Image (cartoon, rainbow, N blue to C red):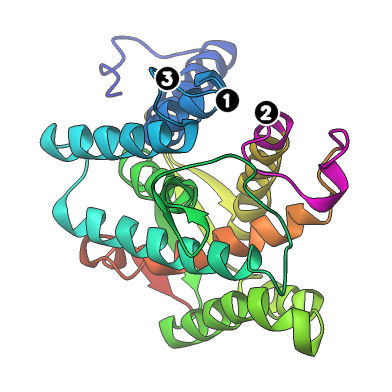
Amino acid sequence: MSPAAPTRPRGALEQFVLEFLFFGLKEARACLFAGLFFIGVFCVPRAGVWGVPRYDVLLLLALGIQGWMLKAGLETVDELKAICLFHVLGFALEAFKTSSGIKSWSYPDFAYTRLAGVPLFSGFMYAAVGSYVIQAWRLFELQIRHHPPHWMAGLVALLIYANFFTHHFLGDWRAYLGAVALGLYARSTVIFTPLDRPRHMPLLLAFVLIGCFIWVAENISTFFAVWQYPNQMGAWAMVHVGKWSSWSLLVLMTFTIVTSLKHIKARIHIAA
């Protein structure tokens, strides 16, 4: 992850290739928890392993990966606390969305480790997003320029999370919240270092790109019937592209929580 200092000037093509390579390596490393967890999602048979139901195997796998990362020093205790918060928030959303009065999606298979009808492993899918953001922050030496005041970002994140619940009763305010976020983060830039030179990207673009990857992972997960939407009961169908925007907003919310960590907050420039 730490390239050696160059012994000679690099040409433009060599610099591009090396940056592209290290960008891919660092992305893979940042996705360590998410990657290992979703390999389990795709590889664990629907019938389970040695008589243990699939959802319970996935819970044990997630706990094992998380414990190993903490013991190996790949995550700090403070970072683990933030990831546990993502788990709790995600599980609360899952419990609401799968409840008898809502039924936005469902988990079709049996599990011993269910609470309120939801397999406990499900919260780790949200924790995986938080883990990625935390790891990427360290590996790419991220800095944020022109970040909105923390109270504004926190308020928008809270409204985004609330809308996941209230849109069933008060209407979907996702487009309005997206417009507010667009104005709030319009000047925000993320500075990242793939190799040895800092690069810049609009922060909003980063949210959208990460949301896209999550949407792709969701399509693969529903194909393997880890969970199912009502229109996928008879035969699998692609998850509606509108979910991409929901995931992008969720990434924004996750990012806002991560910025509350002390060692991360110090690298954020608040817009004047």
Mark 3 to mark 2: distance in Å? 16 Å
Q: Which residue is mark 3?
A: 49
Magenta segment includes 78: no
Q: Is residue 23 visible?
A: no
Q: Nearer the viewer, residue 36 or 25?
A: 36
Label 1 Cα crowd, 10 Å radius (few <14 / some 14-19 / many 20+): some
Q: Nearer the viewer, residue 201 or 209?
A: 209
Where is the N terminus found, in terms of image quarters?
top left
**Does residue 172 appear to the left or right of 149 in the view shown?**
right
Q: Amino acid at mark 1?
A: Arg
**Residue at point 39% right, 55% down?**
143
Question: For the residue labelled by badge 1, is the local secondary structure a helix, a strand or a loop?
Answer: loop
Magenta-colored span: 220-237
Label 2 Cα crowd, 10 Å radius (few <14 / some 14-19 / many 20+): some
Q: Which residue is mark 2?
A: 224
Q: Which mark is residue 46?
A: 1
> First in sequence: mark 1 or mark 2?
1
Q: Amino acid at mark 3?
A: Val
**Residue at point 45% right, 83% down?**
149
